[in-house]
Image: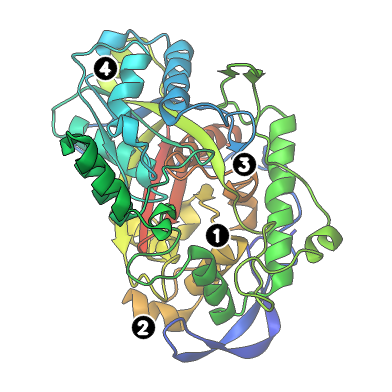
Amino acid sequence: MATAMLRLARSSHRLCSPLGGVEAVRALSTSVVHHAPEAKAAAAPTKTKKTLARQGVKNIVLVEGVRTPFLQAGTSYANMMPHDLARQALLGLLQRTSLPRDVVDYIVFGTVIQEVKTSNLARESALGAGFSDRIPAHTVTMACISSNQAMTSAVGLIAAGQCDAVVAGGVEFMSDVPIRFSRKMRSIMMKTPKAKTAGAKLGLLAQIRPSYLAPELPGVTEFSTNETMGHSADRLAAAFGVSRKDQDEYAVRSHTLAKKAQDEGLLSDVIPCPVPGKGVVSKDNGIRVSSMEQMGKLKAAFVRPHGTITAANASFLTDGASAVLIMEEQKALSMGYKPLAYLRDFVYTSQDPKDQLLLGPTYATPKVLDRAGLKLQDIDVFEYHEAFAGQILANLKAMDSEWFAQNYLGRQSKVGVPDVNKFNNWGGSLSIGHPFGATGCRLVTTTAHRLKKEDGQFGLVAACAAGGQGHGMIVERYPS
C-alpha cells in the first residue's frame, strides 16, 4: 500500500494553473486510493508528541459529538422540518452526556438554506429540546462550513471568559427548501391587506400576469460569478488534470471505507432518530459501494457531454443535523466528563470565488499548521470535506505543487500530500452525506474518535465552502 494519497508517476506533463499559468509538474495517479487502509492497530503505537497546550491560554475541549443519520433528501425525513432534526441532535447530545440543561451557557447552530418560519433555528431547536428559555442562542451561516463557524464561535466565547459550556451544531434540510413567488407577485400580495373594498381587491387581481406566478427557487449558483459549484468543480478538475477515472476511484474508496466503518460500528456519533410515521432511523442511507464499471456508465452531471463530475463522484443532497458539547477543560472535569479531544488552532481563508472556489483546504492546511507549529508529518488523522472527488484531488495536487505554493500561497515550498493511511479512513461526505450546515461537526467528531482508535495525537480538519472560503482546525487527542 502506498504511503501517499497520490503516487507520483514517472512521466511529466504540463498542467494549466487555475488562473491560466502553466507549470511543469509530475503526473499524479489515484490508482491506489480506492483500497482500504491497512489496519492501524498492527502498527507500532504513535509516539507522544509535545502537546499544543499554551501557558495562560484556556484549554477548550470537545466533550461529545452526535449527529442524526445523514439521509438522502426526499427519503425518510421528507415530512419533517429543519428544527425537528436539530432538536433530535440536541436531544441525542443530552442523552449521550446526561448533561443538565441549565449548565449550558450558550447555543449556536449553523445552517445554509434558512427555513423562513424559524429564522433563528438555533433558538427554536433549543426550546424544542427543553433547554431553558434563559439560554441565548443564535444561528450562523457560512455555506458548507457553517457548523465549523458555530464551533469556533463556541471556542471564542469560552476563550473570552463569557461561557464555560456551549453547545454548537448545524442542520440542513434539502427535502423542503423555501420557494418564493416572483417579486412582482410578492409586491401585489403585500398590498392585499390594505385593499379593504371589493373594488380594490379586484384591481390588484387585475394586475396579475401569468408570468408573475413563476416560482423563484433558492439560488444554486454563486451570486458573484453566476456559476454552479458543479461547473466550478469540473473546471477545477480539468485545470489540475484530474481524470474521470481518478475521481471514480476516489468515490469508490470513500463509499468502501464508509461501508466498512458503518459495519464495524465505528460511526458511533450517529444517534437513533425517531421519524413520525417511519419509526426510528438509525443509520446513514447514502453509502453505496459500486464498481468502477458501474461508475463509468454515468454521464456528466454539469458540463455536458465532456465533463468528469457525475452524480456518483459528487456529494448528494442530504438531510441531517449534528451537535457537539464544547467546554472549558476544568469545567468539564469538575462535572465528571472525560473529554474526547482538545480543540486547538483554527483558521478561516478566502480566495477568488471564480477560479479557486473549492481550494479552501489548500489554503487552510499550511496556515493552520503554521499557527500550531506543526508539520504535515505531525498529523496522525486527516478529515477533509469531500464536496466532489475532483475537488479533493485538485486540492491534493495543488498542495503537492511547488509552483502553486510560490505563486498563490506565498510559500517557498509546497505543502505536501497527506499519507493515504491517515486520510478520511471512515469515508467522507461523498458517501456519508453532506448536509451543508452540519458537516463540520461530523468532521471534528470523527477526527476525535479516529485519534483514539488509531492511536494518534493530532488531527487536521479542512473544508471548502461556497464563496471561495475555507476552514482548517487542529484537534488534539485528550490523554488517556
Give the amino acid type for the residue marked by disc 3 in the picture.
Ile
Q: Nearer the viewer, mark 2 or mark 1?
A: 2
The label number, if any, that marks residue 210 in the structure image = none
Query: Foreground: 228 or 152?
Result: 228
Q: Residue at x 42, y 46 (%)?
A: 179
In the rendered structure, which disc, 4 or 1, sits on the residue that comes first in sequence? 4
Left or right of 382? Residue 116 is left
From the image, tell me which residue sits under label 3. 432
Q: Which residue is mark 2?
A: 407
Camera-nearest residue between 59 and 200: 200
- First in sequence, mark 2 or 1: give its number: 2
135 relative to 468, above or below = above
Instruction: Look at the numbered discs 3 and 4 and tell me whether their residues touch, using CB distance below 8 Å.
Output: no
Q: Between residues 358 and 328, which one lies in front from this camera angle? A: 358
Q: Which x, y percent locates residue 267?
A: 62, 31
Q: Amino acid at mark 1?
A: Pro
Residue 105 image position (x, y, % from top left): 22, 20
> Residue at point 30% right, 13% down?
131
Label placed on residue 418: 1
